Image (cartoon, rainbow, N blue to C red):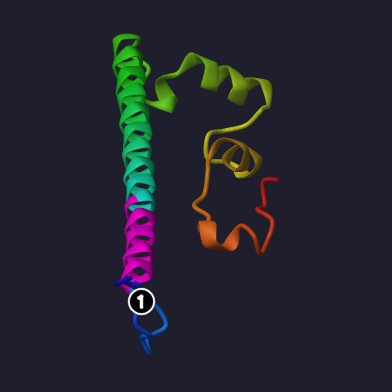
Amino acid sequence: MKYQYAERDVPAMLGRRGFIKVIGLCAVAVVAAGTAIVKLIKSRNQIILDRQQGLYADDKRLQKMNLTSSHENDVCWRVYKDMNGKPVEGEMYKLNHTHYVARSQLAMKEADHV
């Protein structure tokens, strides 16, 4: 007696093997995306920590040189003197002070200082 094996017809779109393949591919995609997101967050945090450490190092260096304020900095005073200006006077204020610009608006309009 010969036996013949055949899968039964299933009304579903996928059989068991096809379903397992699709679920496996979805799991791989989720894990890969999660790994990439975690890696991006860690690298961004490291960049922020490195920048913070650099700023603190600069502050300590400037404190040792007694240059903690711009009004105590000889170079700033020389610039004011060369340009015949005072620290908070019109053009000097414009050149030496920064202003907050929302990043969401940078694409829409050009900043004044550019």
Location of the N terminus (image quadrant): bottom left
Q: Using residue 105 as the reference point, say whether residue 74 is left or right of it.
A: left
Q: Residue at x 43, y 26 (%)?
A: 71
Looking at this view, is 111 or 79 the one in front? 111
List x then y, in percent, for residue 2.
33, 70
Give whichever of 20, 97 is nearer the camera.
Answer: 20
For disc 1, the neighbor class at 10 Å (few under 14, some 14 to 19, many from 20) is: few
Please check the rendered image and state whether residue 64 is part of the magenta-colored stretch, yes or no.
no
The magenta stretch is: 16-31
Q: Main secondary structure of the magenta part?
A: helix
Name the quadrant containing residue 39. top left
Q: Residue at x 60, y 25 (%)?
A: 80
Q: Quadrant of the C terminus?
A: top right
Query: x, y (%) of residue 90?
Result: 62, 44
- In the picture, measured across the screen, residue 7 lies left or right of residue 110, that is left
Q: Secondary structure at mark 1?
A: loop
Q: Residue 95: x percent and y percent?
A: 62, 37
- Outermost residue toward the front in this view: 1
In the displayed structure, does residue 66 sit left or right of residue 85?
left
Magenta segment includes 22: yes
Residue at horizontal 37 percent and vertical 75 percent from the top: 6
Figure label count:
1
Instruction: Reply above or below: 14 against 64.
Output: below
**Foreground: 112 or 66?**
112
Q: Which residue is mark 1?
A: 7
Q: Kindly identify the amino acid type of the residue bearing the numbered disc 1.
A: Glu
Q: Residue furthest top?
A: 65
Residue 32, image x and y in percent?
Answer: 37, 49
Above/below status of 55 relative to 39 = above
Answer above or below: position of 58 versus 102.
above
